[in-house]
Image (tube, helix red, strand yellow):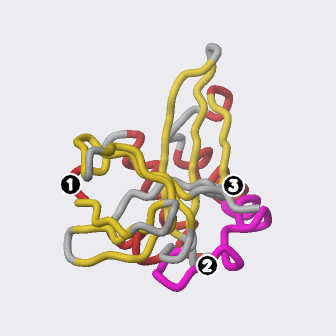
Amino acid sequence: MSPLERIREAAARVAGSYGLEIFEVDLRREGGRQVLRVVLDRPGPNATAEESVSLEDCARVSEELSTILDVEDIVPADRYTLEVSSPGLDRPLRSAGDYERFAGRRAKIVLSAPVARQTAFAGVLRGLDGDEVLFESEGGKPVRLPLGLIARARLDVEF
């Protein structure tokens, strides 16, 4: 098992003990030092913004994960910085379930090929129908966006 896989496994154990899941794990060199980033998420289609990952959640997972990583010596303690966070308000949408989970929220979607002569969309997610994202573009026009064409998508911050 690679060090990153071992880190992901340890992070998943710790996060799971708090009812959280791992959104992303990244280990990279920055400024001569390794930075380990662990992004937590609240699982399930019913998790709302009000039930998002808290600062306290991040602190608890960071403390426990740091101890495990040091004890198991996966990454030498003096050679990395651990950062634990949530995906944020403008979180990326990665899975089909994300489009259902965040139905009713504003989002921005970029496609790899045009649909209705357009590759960039901003508007409101309306859910999922098979392999298509139901989307209401600004101006209220409904459009179906094939999941296979989505190059990147993220929630749009609403104030």
101 lies above or below 124: below
Q: Position of residue 117 (x, y in %)?
A: 27, 45
Amino acid at circle 3:
Ser
Q: Earlier in the sequence, mark 2 or mark 3?
A: 2
Q: Secondary structure at mark 1?
A: helix
Q: Nearer the viewer, residue 46 or 155?
A: 155
Q: Tell us which disc is closer to us: 3 or 1.
A: 1
Q: Residues in magenta?
A: 43-62
Determine which residue is flagged by label 1: 148
Amino acid at circle 1:
Gly
Determine which residue is flagged by label 2: 48
Determine which residue is flagged by label 3: 62
Q: Nearer the viewer, residue 91 or 41?
A: 91
Q: Earlier in the sequence, mark 2 or mark 1?
A: 2
88 lies above or below 140: above
Residue placed at 57% from the left, 73% from the top? 42
Q: Report how far apart the C-alphas of labels 2 and 3 lie in the structure.
A: 23 Å
Binning the other alpha carbons within 10 Å of mark 2 as few (below 14), some (14 to 19) or many (20 upward) gives few
Q: Report how far apart the C-alphas of labels 2 and 1 lie in the structure.
A: 26 Å
Q: Secondary structure at mark 3?
A: helix
Residue placed at 46% from the left, 77% from the top? 101
